[in-house]
């Protein structure tokens, strides 16, 4: 069963490749990205906005499952909305078209809490709610969810997805998201002891640690299709504010100083849910998060400090 991961050098993609290779075998998982990365082979340069190259890679490796991670995130998307549309929607359409034409069994689509706008309950936002996003990123994710439903219903491609919250990870920094502060604060705390946060101290957002993010995608695709009421599910692990994560980090780094200077990303965060109701995923395919805020902070700091110690001990 050959698996293709697009966007494999990105924050989720770079760790998903390792998780999939560990589970299904290294030679069964093809990593791909627009630019070379330091991922072990098999790796293919792949611009997912060019359908012919998607067709070529899927055919060459007889791909049966595609995890489509390539995308422009919310903050970057607001700097160039037209590019965000072209990349996010154009590449998904390419993946879905190639999937239906070449008999790909499954496609994973990473949706986002960004599909929600300010006109839905912001606490424990339900699975079924009006989707009126205020960002182009959110518009592309709503469009993506509609395409997932359509290609599953009309062509029988088994497309599944998750409305991911902010994802925190230690291996590859995120790029261009509104939730990126929750990763940046760890690096700043370990390296400098001070951080300037681009959101207000009290901005509550749904979040998840990378191990939970990866396991959720794999478990969703392995779930019996008959159990699934939806193509794309709400999912979360925790919700916290910059003030709360800073306080948790201070339990390990007491001197951490954080300054709050909201920028354009504050308006994006203010349009998103403060917390998510992910009970449909718990009921339908047994979703259960394993990391809460204290557990994530402890693990993140151990990993970053370990890497820092290795760097300091390596002769320059
Ligand atoms: C972003 O901040 O844009 C992403 C997301 C929540 O989808 N991390």
Image (cartoon, grey):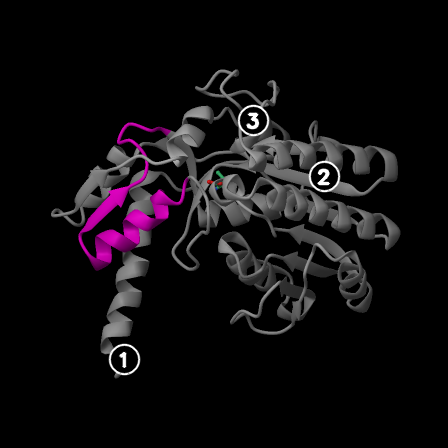
At mark 2, the secondary structure is: loop
Q: Position of residue 218 (x, y in %)?
A: 61, 48
Q: Position of residue 88 (x, y in %)?
A: 64, 45
Q: Does the image show residue 17? A: yes
> Residue visible at 31% across and 32% down?
241
Q: Position of residue 219 (x, y in %)?
A: 61, 44
User: Measured along the vertical axis of the image, is residue 27 above or below residue 226?
Assistant: below
User: Could you classify mark 2 by the number of other residues whose Cα lies within 10 Å: few (under 14), some (14-19), or many (20 or more)?
Assistant: few
Q: From the viewer's perspective, is 203 left or right of 96?
A: left
Pointer 1 or 2: first along the chain:
2
At mark 1, the secondary structure is: loop
Q: Which residue is mark 3?
A: 133
Q: Which residue is mark 2?
A: 224
Q: Which residue is mark 1?
A: 314
Pick whichever, 294 or 34, lies toward us: 34
**Number of numbered discs overlaid on the protein picture:** 3
Tell which tag, 1 or 3, sits nearer the viewer: 3
Pointer 1 or 3: first along the chain:
3
């Amino acid at each position: 069963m050959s698996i293709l991961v697009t966007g494999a050098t990105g924050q989720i993609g770079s760790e998903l490749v390792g998780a999939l290779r560990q589970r299904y075998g290294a030679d069964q998982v093809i990593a791909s990205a627009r630019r070379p990365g330091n991922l072990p082979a098999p790796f293919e340069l792949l611009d997912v906005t060019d359908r012919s190259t998607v067709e070529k890679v899927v055919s060459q490796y007889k791909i049966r499952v595609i995890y489509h991670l390539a995308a422009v995130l919310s903050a970057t998307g607001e700097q160039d909305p037209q590019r965000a549309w072209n990349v996010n929607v154009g590449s998904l359409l390419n993946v879905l078209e190639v999937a239906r034409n070449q008999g790909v069994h499954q496609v994973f689509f990473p949706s986002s809490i960004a599909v929600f706008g300010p006109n839905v309950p912001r606490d424990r936002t339900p699975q079924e709610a009006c989707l009126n996003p205020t960002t182009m990123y959110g518009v592309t994710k709503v469009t993506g969810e509609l395409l997932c439903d359509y290609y599953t219903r009309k062509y029988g491609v088994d497309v599944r997805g998750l409305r991911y919250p902010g994802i925190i990870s230690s291996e590859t920094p995120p790029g261009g998201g509104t939730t990126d502060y929750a990763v940046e604060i760890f690096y700043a705390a370990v390296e400098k002891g001070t951080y300037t946060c681009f959101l207000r101290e009290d901005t509550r957002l749904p979040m998840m640690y990378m191990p939970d993010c990866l396991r959720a995608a794999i478990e969703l695709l392995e779930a019996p299709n008959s159990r699934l009421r939806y193509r794309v599910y709400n999912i979360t692990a925790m919700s916290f504010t910059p003030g709360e994560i800073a306080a948790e980090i201070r339990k390990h780094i007491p001197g951490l100083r954080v300054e709050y200077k909201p920028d354009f990303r504050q308006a994006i965060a203010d349009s998103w849910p403060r917390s998510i109701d992910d009970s449909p995923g718990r009921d339908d395919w047994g979703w259960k998060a394993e990391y809460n805020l204290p557990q994530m902070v402890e693990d993140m700091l151990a990993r970053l400090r370990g890497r820092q110690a290795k760097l300091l001990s390596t002769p320059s």
